Image (tube, rainbow, N blue to C red):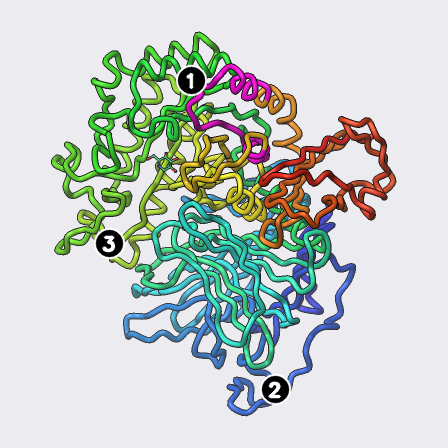
Amino acid sequence: MTELIQFDPKKQLFILSNAATTYLMEIVEETYLLHRYWGKRLTDYHFSNRPPLKKRTFAATPLIEKPEISPEFLPFEFPFAHQGDYRNSAISIQRENSETLTRFHYQHYEIKTGIHDLPNLPHARATDAFSQTLVIYLYDQIAELELALFYTIFEDSPIIVRSSQLTNKSQQTIQLQKLLSASLDIPYEQQLSTTFYGTHQKEFQLNRSPIQHGLYQIGSSRGASSPQYPPYLALSKDATEHQGDVHALSLIYSGNHEITLERDQYNQLRVQIGLNSQNFSWKLAPDETFCSPQALLSYSDQGFNGNSQNFHQFFTNHLIHPAWKQKTRPILINSWEMTYYDVNALLLTRLIDAADELGFETVVLDDGWYQNRNSSKTSLGDWTIDQEKFPDGLKPLVDYAKQRNIGFGIWFEPEMISPNTQLIREHPEWVMRSAEYEPILGRSQYILDLTNPEVQQFIIETLAKTITELGVNYVKWDMNRHMTEPFSQSQTFAASEYSHRYMLGLYQIIDTLTSTYPNVLFENCSSGGGRLDPGMLYYFPQTWISDNTDGLDRQQIQYGASYLFPISSMTGHVSDVPNHQTQRLIPFETRAALASSTNMGYEMDIIQLSTEEKEQVKQHIQQYKEERTLLMNGKFYRLDSPFDSNLCAWLFLNQEEVILYVFRNIYQVFDLSLLIKLPVLEATSYYQEAKTQQIYSGSELIHCGLALENPKGDFLVHKIKLKKL
Ligand code: DGJ
């Protein structure tokens, strides 16, 4: 087994290296742990990039004989305050005497085989691929605090996994006010930063900009990773989708997070990611330990697509539960946009019949099935079946579907509670709220206090009962509001611990349920992609990435989300026109192609379709079934960005075939044709186009491109299938 981690005692250098990447840290003056390099694999290293140090006015100089060494500009691996480093710190604490000073100095290290198994938090999974973990211990002798930095590297991935851990070895209780997962000091080289912003129905919007002096921060303090700023940041200089260096970071966490970029006076960049430190403080009693979530550091010299490939493969191999990795996901018909809350037994029976006729594999009963739930204003928490809508319950429907070899799925919003419910009357103390202020509603509902073990048990038992009694094979787990009063009425910990404790409660619940029901497919949803992050992906193999099913907006949303997430983890539905979110009229083929570019399903009234429309849907489903191995397990590459132009193009490929989708939005008279270059094909191979049987060389498709018709009409799609000869 080739070692992936080494320590060179002469150079005082930690070397993490595999076939794709190298990461280097140096111990300086037996004290400071400094960052030296992260990027493409190096064969050897002799400090060629180590900047010559120079004495600077105003710079603190801890060593009298070496005034050129100052924390003001040293590239720290995990910086702390009050030592002369005035940049953003990665850790801060407060002791009983109210001092916030620390001096974490290098102490020792260990190299372990395998991963770092984080207790209670989602984390990179071990597989057959060889991996090693480096633990570097830093110690503050006055405060008696041990800081452990973890670095895991796998033989099969360019991604390095980092996290940190603080242990209180003193006799006094301290307050941990900040503990980030990773911090990196690297030279500023005119990089651009890429992040995503968004909102409900408009997730994953690309945000690329130059980096100015000072601080730039994105994050969430909403109690969820949020569609506003999902945990992703990339740095690139002149990278395109296909070439150039891209360094990207993400976080395996679903709650409050922060990502900070700081460009200092000396043109150095500090890049940080971790738990949001605003309003955070954690009591750490003697001998207690606090662990940060894991950060993912992904480097590629193959542009943004290369970097996305890193994430896609890492998530598939090391994050998604292995049972779901290659498992075929059912093609769903979901009731939501068909009737919203207006569901009933007769309708569901007819939906199952139509699903059977058209080739669907699972019928999903969305919101509205439990008592009195006719709008968003009621019933969350009272999870008993509505007797008026379903006089015989749901079991006969599940069985009816099963007889037709169709699965049955059900919607829940387990973390919520509505006013005027039996549950709130019985357990007013289960509501997340402050003791004195009236809690604020969001979508007419309150959030349950998931830090309370009784609430955790209630949710587990409620879902377990329904899953077992009905025998469903799918659960949609929704979460439709953000936190306003993150406080517990029954637990005694400080309010500043609440948001993280909520996440630990949530993870405990979904860990229990997903391991008790390994064959039930749990789909993550938070008004679409409101909690679309690697943390949820650890438990739930797929996410409903947006409530927006419009054929134009979805291009951007799917394009953006694919920077991080593999296609098999995103779901997309063909819905009706005019589109319910935008009123746009987009042709069926385009809507179908977009949904086919994800884990595909439908969300429209399939009962009322005309014979012709039924035929269209049938054919689409049949075709998707034939192609889904390639679509779900092949490689996905972005080609033309809908953020830049009127075109959006991407392709799927494996060793044998290619499916190319080109979405052309507004018809332009000027465009004689649409020219698409396919730089991800093999130059020396030949490809045959399915419709015309024309053979093209890989090199011509890469360099000349493929000229496609530009017919009149808006929002059209070209689907091109190529067979590798
Ligand atoms: C929000 C989800 O994103 C929708 O798909 C649907 O399930 C509704 N909630 C139901 O209330």
Q: Residues within 10 Å of mark 1 (few under 14, many from 20)?
A: some
- Distance between mark 3 and mark 1 Cα atoms: 43 Å
The answer to whether the residues at label 3 and label 2 have Cβ atoms under 8 Å apart is: no
Whether residue 538 is visible, yes or no, is: no
- Distance between mark 1 and mark 2 Cα atoms: 77 Å
The part of the chain drawn in magenta is: 590-619
Residue 156 percent coordinates (x, y): 68, 43
Q: Which residue lies under the disc numbered 1?
A: 607
Q: Residue at x 32, y 70 (%)?
A: 95
Residue 415 percent coordinates (x, y): 30, 39
Q: Horizontal placement of 426 versus 520: left or right? A: left
Q: Does residue 644 lie above or below 316 as drawn?
A: below
Residue 331 percent coordinates (x, y): 51, 24
Q: Residue at x 54, y 69 (%)?
A: 270
Q: Horizontal placement of 50 versus 594: left or right? A: right
The answer to whether the residues at label 3 and label 1 have Cβ atoms under 8 Å apart is: no
Q: Horizontal placement of 596 versus 172: left or right? A: right
Residue 255 located within the stretch drawn in magenta: no
The answer to whether the residues at label 1 and label 2 have Cβ atoms under 8 Å apart is: no
In terms of secondary structure, where does tag 2 sit? loop
Q: Is residue 195 or residue 72 the one in the foreground?
A: 195
Q: Which residue lies under the disc numbered 3?
A: 485
Q: Which residue lies under the disc numbered 2?
A: 68
Q: Residues within 10 Å of mark 3 (few under 14, many from 20)?
A: many
Picture quarter containing residue 374? top left
Which mark lies nearer to you, 1 or 2?
A: 1
Which mark lies nearer to you, 3 or 1?
A: 1
The answer to whether the residue bearing label 2 lies less than 8 angstroms from the nearest atom of ligand 1 is no
Q: Amino acid at mark 2?
A: Glu
Residue 23 percent coordinates (x, y): 66, 60
Q: Is residue 319 or residue 392 the one in the foreground?
A: 392
Quadrant position of ligand 1: top left
